[in-house]
Structure formats: C-alpha cells, structure tokens
Amino acid sequence: MKRYIEIEKLVYQEIEKNCFGNKKRNGYRHLFGVSQLCRLYSTHFQLDQGLCAIMGLLHDYSVYKNNTSFNHAVLSSELAEKLLKETLLFDEKEIEIIVEAIKNHSTKNKRHDRYSELLKMCDVVDSYLHEPEMILDHDRKYYLEKWRKLDE
C-alpha cells in the first residue's frame, strides 16, 4: 500500500499542476476509477493487487501530464516506466508488468497478457459506468461483456 500511496501523490501533483476544470475532474475520476476497478478485479484474475491498482492509476498518465491523448498508451507507458524507476520502489519485473499493460491498453482489438486484459476491461467499464449511453464498438463490447459475466 505504501507504494500505491507514493504513486498516488505524484499523480495528484501532475493533475493539480497541468489540469483545470473538467479536465481535472475527469482526470481524477477516470484514473482513480480505473485504479479501483483494477484493484477490485485483480483477485478474481489472481493478479497482484498493488501492481493492478498502480497500472490503473498510470494508464492515461500522459493525457493529464501532457494535455493530449495523442499516442497516449505508448507515452503513458514511457512516463510510467521513468516514474517507477525513479521511485526505487519497484523491481524490474514489476515495472515491466505495469509498463506492458499500459502500453497495450488502447489496443482493444488484440489480446495480450492477463494484466493488459484486466486494464483494458477496467478502462472500458469505468468509461461505461460514467456514460452508459455511449456507443461501444465491437472490441469495447467484448470487454463490457467480459465484465458482466464476472457477476454470473
């Protein structure tokens, strides 16, 4: 939990420094929402709860740090890698798991490792929960259905 709190502080600082109004509100809502969903469902998929919470927290980091969503999965993965290494709180394998999931999270039309798949699902679910009328493409529907089946 200590590691999560340290990363959370850094994310708060970036959002406070770089975002205003709706962008700030959406940043807090989405990053922390996806993080909590990842934490919640990590146990169902037998994944490390702490790593899942952190990958959720950082998955769109560049959107709020750089104020653009262009190539945000790759840019967020690069920023996350740098940030995680600088904290000295994570080993190489942990960093690799988090960075890979973040890098893959926007590629909803391909299947990846279990951490990436969890992050994709939680990203879609969080967006859906805040905008249930949104139009979902085939790939996002896949992740929403995957989530719905968890409760069956």
Image (cartoon, rainbow, N blue to C red):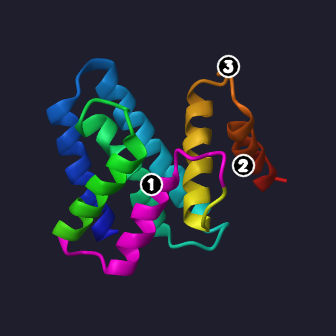
Residue 66 coordinates in the image, percent (x, y): 24, 35
The residue drawn where x is 19% and y is 41% is 14
Secondary element at tag 3: loop
Query: Residue 62 is drawn in which quadrant?
Result: top left
Query: Residue 145 is drawn in which quadrant?
Result: top right
Whether residue 108 sits left or right of residue 34 in the image: it is: right
Distance from the alpha carbon under mark 2 to that under mark 3: 17 Å
* Image vertical order of residue 76 relative to residue 28, above or below: below
* Image vertical order of residue 83 relative to residue 48, above or below: above
Distance from the alpha carbon under mark 1 to that under mark 3: 27 Å
Observer-nearest of 59 and 138: 138
Secondary element at tag 2: helix
Query: Residue 77 is drawn in which quadrant?
Result: bottom left
Secondary element at tag 1: helix
Q: Which residue is mark 2?
A: 147
| Residue 108 belongs to the span the image colors magenta | yes
User: Which corner quadrant holds the N terminus?
Assistant: bottom left
Residue 55 coordinates in the image, percent (x, y): 42, 58
Whether residue 70 sits left or right of residue 127 in the image: it is: left
* Image vertical order of residue 18 relative to residue 11, above or below: above
The residue drawn where x is 23% and y is 44% is 12
Q: Which residue is mark 1?
A: 103
Whichever of callouts 1 and 2 sits on the residue coming sooner in the sequence is 1
In the rendering, which numbered label is found on residue 133?
A: 3
Residue type marked 3: Glu
Whether residue 108 sits left or right of residue 63 in the image: it is: right
Residue type marked 2: Trp
